[in-house]
Image (cartoon, grey):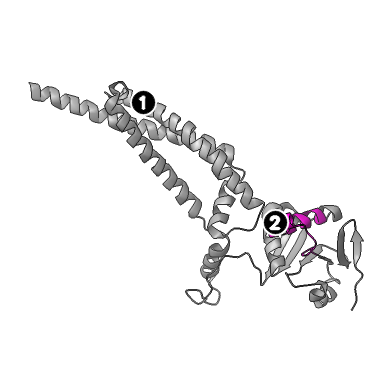
Amino acid sequence: MQYEIKQQDKFKFIEEGNGEPLVLLHGLFGALSNFEHLIEYFRHHYKVVVPMLPLFDLDLLHTSVGGLQKYLNKFMEARNYKGVHLLGNSLGGHVALLYVLKHPERIRSLILTGSSGLFENGMGDSYPKRGDYEYIKKKTEMTFYDPATAALIGFTLHILTGTIAGNIFGQVSIFWRRISPYNARHGMVSGIIVGVLLWALLFVPVATFAIQPMIDSFRNSITPNQYVYSIVTNFEGLYPIIILGSLAFHIIYGVLLGYISGRMMELKTLQGVRMNY
């Protein structure tokens, strides 16, 4: 069956039926004809929309999955589609994944068929059991989201920066006795100062000029693999909370280590006094 190809501004598309919008995205070598049977079936229940993706019409700078996602977003806005059921095949699935990550407020459901852009184990390491929810949950997390990754990376970074700061402080205190903690109270004050300096000179610049731009670049380019996706998902939009939370962490970390260092110095001094007597 031949369907009318409509045009609005630069957008060419098929739109058949009434109801909730069902948007179909074709693949790299696909065309509107790929969805002929789907259009015929679903147009009786939904408003079926098939936009023509400009796979060979975009300029070189925007010829990417990110560029197609931006094109799709402009199309959705121009047609004012809301509560969309988005179905993507092959490259169209990749575009759909990236669109959902950036504009979840417009999407009611996502359907992927042979989608690219997924990180997966080709052969797998086990076989599913019928009705095994935990197996499906595990495999889904492997593809879309690993909940432990971001927390593990954050914890490792803090331990690493704390270790570096401790070594620097220890080396400096050897030559500058004034900052060496001679009791627990002085140690806590020194620890707070070192913690805040470490936060201001190391953590804030790294978070502002390295991590945040990386997150922005991933959001504006292709869909990342599961590890990058996990990091982006956890940290996106949380910059102020992360900065303030890291400041609190560095202060607490400094107080604890400063107290331990100062207390050890007190015990060492007391032991020296007793030996003199």
State the residue lying farthest toward the left: 277
Return the x and y of residue 112 as percentages of the image width and height: 68, 68
The residue drawn where x is 53% and y is 40% is 207
Q: Disc 1 to disc 2, how far (Cα)?
A: 48 Å
Q: Is residue 169 above or below residue 109?
A: above
Kind of residue sitting beneath label 2: Gly
Let me know if residue 69 is in the magenta part.
yes
Return the x and y of residue 235 as percentages of the image width and height: 57, 46
SS for dot 2 = helix
The residue drawn where x is 35% and y is 27% is 188
Return the x and y of residue 156 as percentages of the image width and height: 42, 47
Q: Tell me if residue 245 can be seen.
A: no
Earlier in the chain: of badge 1 and badge 2, it is: 2
Kind of residue sitting beneath label 1: Ser
- Reading the image, the residue beneath label 1 is 190
**The C terminus, quarter of image:** top left
The residue drawn where x is 33% and y is 34% is 257
Taking depth in this image into account, of 74 and 246 the one nearest to the observer is 74
Which mark is on residue 66? 2
Where residue 93 sits, quadrant-wise, is bottom right
SS for dot 1 = helix
Region of the chain picked out in magenta, as a range: 53-76
Return the x and y of residue 245 as percentages of the image width and height: 50, 37
Taking depth in this image into account, of 40 and 182 the one nearest to the observer is 182
